[in-house]
Amino acid sequence: MSKPAKKPRRTAERILEVTLELFNRFGEPNVSTTAISAELNISPGNLYYHYPAKDELINSLFDRYEEALAELLGAADSVRNVEDAWLFFHMLFELIWNYRFLYRDLNDLLSKNRRLETHFQRVLADKGRAVRAVLAGLAQAEAMRIDSQRSGPMADAMVVVLTYWLSYEYVRDPRNALEPAGAAAALSRGAFHVLSLLSPYLGAAEQAHLQTLAGAYKGNH
């Protein structure tokens, strides 16, 4: 008995998937709508029917990122130890990696797209609230000790690393940093460096566990 034919994916969905892949690979400024339609083997008119302007493609992808980010940041309230925090920040870096074109070309995108400019400010604020929730959870569980005067600047510093880590990786190795083969190592380094900011405030057992987590992850990738 033959298997039922799979339903073809909607064109609009395919367009977004291919656009994300191209943006991530080459950078948004280097990908034209003509290149997207050629990659999809559809006419430019078909592309424009679904997304009349390139900004609409960017905004649609950003909406997906923002929705996934909001869901992930909600897990910040449940972090109580270094292992929880490692998993949380690693998942956050994975999401950033999946939409890395936003971060690779962030300044350029914000200068050209007013909607993205305003929404990314909200993204930064949401990241800040989530990081402060992580710090509060670790302190409540006595995994770390940090006073209120230090926790605010610490949260800001962690958000900076989260936001610009891939840019730093790119500057270090422009030819390879944003290629899929280097993803695991880049994400691991990012998560470790975010949590390393907390190291002076962690208890001895939590510091040791952070080193163990980082070492185990490097050993498996």
Image (cartoon, helix red, strand yellow):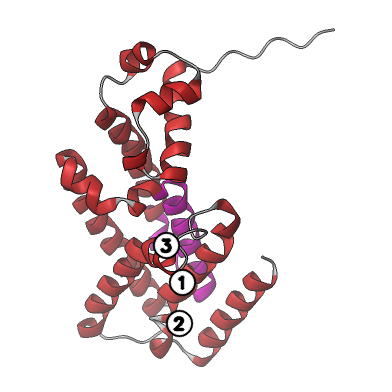
In the rendered image, residue 27, in percent from the top left (x then y), is placed at 38, 45
In the rendered image, residue 63, in percent from the top left (x then y), is placed at 32, 37
Of the 4 image quadrants, the one containing the N terminus is top right
In the rendered image, residue 122, in percent from the top left (x then y), is placed at 21, 51
Which residue is denoted by mark 1 in the rendering? 80
Q: Secondary structure at mark 1?
A: loop
Which residue is denoted by mark 2 in the rendering? 143
The count of marks equals 3
Q: Amino acid at mark 2?
A: Ala
Can residue 173 be seen?
yes
Q: Are marks 1 and 2 in contact (CB under 8 Å)?
A: yes
Left or right position of 221 against 61: right
Of the 4 image quadrants, the one containing the C terminus is bottom right
Which residue range is magenta in the image? 74-100
Query: Is residue 92 found inside the magenta-colored segment of the image?
Result: yes
Which residue is denoted by mark 3 in the rendering? 170
Query: At 38% from the left edge and 53% from the top edge, which residue is drawn?
Result: 74
First in residue order: circle 1 vs circle 3: 1
Query: At 41% from the left edge and 40% from the top edge, which residue is drawn?
Result: 23
The residues bearing labels 1 and 3 have C-alpha atoms spaced at a distance of 32 Å
Q: Are marks 1 and 3 in contact (CB under 8 Å)?
A: no
Pick the residue in front: 150 or 21: 21
